[in-house]
Amino acid sequence: MIQRILLLAILGVLAGCPRTEPTETAPADANTVQAVLETPPVASSGDAADDPVIWVHPTDPLLSLVIGTDKDKGLNVYDLEGQLLQELPDGRLNNVDLRDGFMLGGLGVTVVAASNRSNDSIALYLLNPATRFLTSAGPAVPTGLGDPDGLCMYKSVTGAYFVFIDDSGVGAFQQWQLSDDGGQLVAERVREFNVGGPAEGCAADDELGYLYVAEEGGALWRYSAEPGGGSTRTEIDRVGGGHGLRADLEGVTIWYGPGGTGYLVLSNQGASNFAVYRREGANQFLGIFYIVADAANGIDGVSETDGIDVTSRPLGPKYPSGLLVVQDGVNLDPAEHQDFKYVSWQAIEAALGLP
């Protein structure tokens, strides 16, 4: 991951110099969108906010949530207005994901998993849909990895639930299967493979059975998400491959359309923009967009994004075609700790001319 050192920006402020966003601005002919809103800055300073995941309420979309990591502290839970509802201190949690409908003790529950760098484990939580609060699901799962940070979840068409976690520094991935052991949530390691280089961002397609992995300085890869998938993979796109990808490649997420259609979104962190591909077929490249400042509403642009998540579910009038949530690596105007930005998918459809 790109290490963000903000010392020069701080010194510039102290010297009375004007601050500018420490990344290139969007080209004049770029596809651009603006964030609808932003969350409060995370409590921790430096490179702290990292990865969000969206939970869609089962009966009232307006009660949906965003869960984001403060990787020096734990998890934050936000509502659709970006307001902080819960802080859950639980160690150096880096990446987070969730899946609904896991049967635990005879009840369907929402399982939230996060990579915990404090004890090199998978931290597991349950999300209560009535209170919209997180609680621990029991002891963390030791992984034996040296520094686990990347994590994503997968629900197979077989009904099995899995967690992928990796040591991004060496590209070592593990796949763990979740199960109910007498009402206790437990995990068993069922697969290991190596991407061949540093990699953190990943996303699994529950319907098509694919795992997408962003090798930071290399390529966006597609693997089988099933435990017997081995290390066979297909290259989707590459740094320096002609579509403007620049290291590091970071967060990956999937916008689900009907009949296996939809889109992949990739955080092209090195260029502070986002690449979009078709979900179906050979994952055709569709274009790049930037999230730029909305000066009228005091929302700065987005730079150096790590984690992202998207849903295609309508979430009220602000998000009729779904919601994209991104981590903002450099939160300006005023200069504050990192935060998360909410973007209407409808704006992205318009910017890229998506059907």
Image: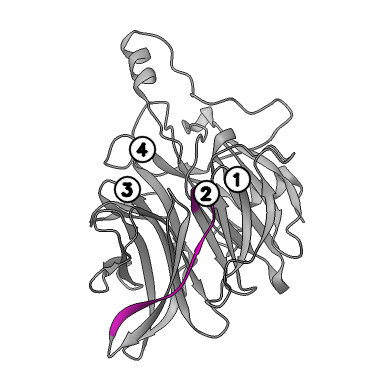
Task: State how far apart marks 2 and 3 are (Cα).
Answer: 25 Å
Residue tagged 4: 47
Mark 1, residues whose alpha carbon is within 10 Å: few (<14), some, or many (≥20)? many
Identity, as a three-letter code, of the amino acid under mark 4: Asp
Q: Is residue 43 above or below residue 150?
A: above
Q: Residue at x 32, y 48 (%)?
A: 70
Nearer the viewer's eye, disc 4 or disc 2? 2
Nearer the viewer's eye, disc 2 or disc 3? 2
Question: Dots 1 and 2: beta carbons under 8 Å?
Answer: yes
Q: Secondary structure under badge 2?
A: loop
Residue tagged 1: 218
Task: State how far apart marks 4 and 2 are (Cα).
Answer: 22 Å
**Segment tinted magenta in the rendering:** 184-200
Identity, as a three-letter code, of the amino acid under mark 3: Asp
Residue 128 occupies which quadrant of the picture?
bottom left
Nearer the viewer's eye, disc 3 or disc 1? 1
